Image (spheres, rainbow, N blue to C red):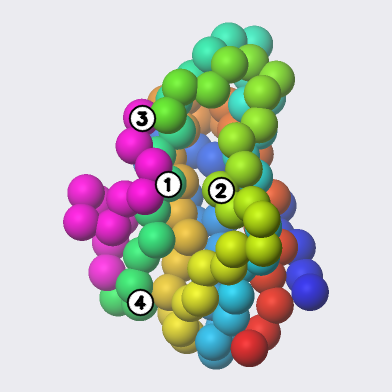
Amino acid sequence: MAIEITEIQDSATTVYTSTGNSAVTFASFCNISGSSDTLDVYVVPDTDTADDTNIVIKQLSVNTADTHQLYLGGEKLLLEDGDTLQATAGTAGAFTAVVSYTSI
């Protein structure tokens, strides 16, 4: 398994790109800012862009110093080569993402 850590901006920010087929085993989004902020998360097929057709979390309000975990209980997100997990913060730099993945 490997880990990606990314600071999320106020526009679609890629937090993981699949190389070959892979499984996202864990994804967390921590609000590191001094106030509540919002978060959007997208699962984007290769060559597509982040928009309302591939959004999985929209305008989630996260309190300061709180973390939202995308996958729990052994669930996995299966991605093909070039697919991405992207996120947008209400305020640039308000969140960090930690993504764990493995090749399949």
Residue at image position (66%, 55%) is 73
Residue 24: name its quadrant: bottom right
Alpha carbon of mark 1 to alpha carbon of mark 2: how far?
9 Å
Residue 51 x/y as whole percent: 24, 51
**Marks 1,2: beta carbons within 8 A:** yes
Give the residue number, with chain letter if any, for mark 3: 59
Q: Is residue 16 magenta?
A: no
What mark, if any, has residue 46 been given in the picture? 4
The residue sitting at the left extreme is: 53
Element type where label 2 sits in the image: loop
| Kind of residue at disc 3 | Gln
Element type where label 4 sits in the image: loop
Would you say residue 12 is visible in this rendering? no
| Kind of residue at disc 1 | Val
**Badge 4: how crowded within 10 Å, few (<14), some, or many (20+)?**
some
Would you say residue 79 is visible in this rendering? yes
Residue 15 x/y as whole percent: 56, 56
Give the residue number, with chain letter if any, for mark 1: 41
The residue sitting at the right extreme is: 1
Alpha carbon of mark 1 to alpha carbon of mark 4: how far?
16 Å
